[in-house]
Amino acid sequence: MNNTQPFEATILLVDDDVDLLELIKETIEDDFSSVLTTDRATAALELIKSKKIDCVVTDYRMPEMSGLALIEYITQNHPEIPIILLTSNGSDPEVINAIETGLFDYVSKPFKAPVLLNRIRNALLLPRLESLIYDLAKTVAPDVSIDGTLTGSYQEKLETFLKIEKQIKPRISLKK
């Protein structure tokens, strides 16, 4: 789908519709270093336990184990893995509850490939950006505590944030 280097990331696709699963894989496989698929949420659990998964894209309704049960397991046991839910009803109370309990985002079916790709990229970029900001803040403003509070006067805080902003702006790139 693209002409640039793929993200160094493993994406796990989970959907009981094997045809849709294959279509999604074909759509995104050029953009990521590895795309794994399974048509069962229980098999997804085994893959998550045995491989380094960077993002999970799962269907909402599946037999045997629902996408919501899978999301609950991942958010409790692997909170570092962002999850994107595929659903036909984004306003369903269960979807809203999943978002409140750790779901990164959702995509309504039918969806356009660029929308799904952007959601996956965002899920992968957010932790990288947070880490970059934290590292830059520690370099530029060593008096920033772990919880983000600053010591000193308002003027000192403002000057520190302006230094951080000046350092961060040229370094942030949303390119792969």
Image: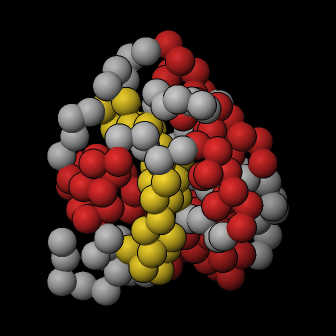
Residue 55: give x, y in percent of width and height.
52, 58
State the residue in front, 15 or 161.
15
Residue 35: give x, y in percent of width and height.
43, 68
Residue pictured at 50% horizontal, 13% vertical: 93
State the residue in front, 72 or 43.
43
Say if 7 sits above or below 49 in the image.
below
Colouring chosen for the image of the structure: secondary structure
Residue 84: give x, y in percent of width and height.
46, 44
Residue 1: give x, y in percent of width and height.
18, 72
Say if 77 sits above or below 135 in the image.
above
Please say whether residue 116 is visible from this viewpoint: no
Residue pictured at 23% horizontal, 62% vertical: 27
Q: Which of the 4 quarters of the picture holds residue 50?
A: bottom right
Residue pictured at 66% horizontal, 70% vertical: 51
Task: Say whether residue 134 is left or right of residue 57.
Answer: right
Say if 93 sits above or below 45 in the image.
above
Task: Say whether residue 110 is left or right of residue 155.
Answer: left
Please say whether residue 67 is visible from this viewpoint: yes
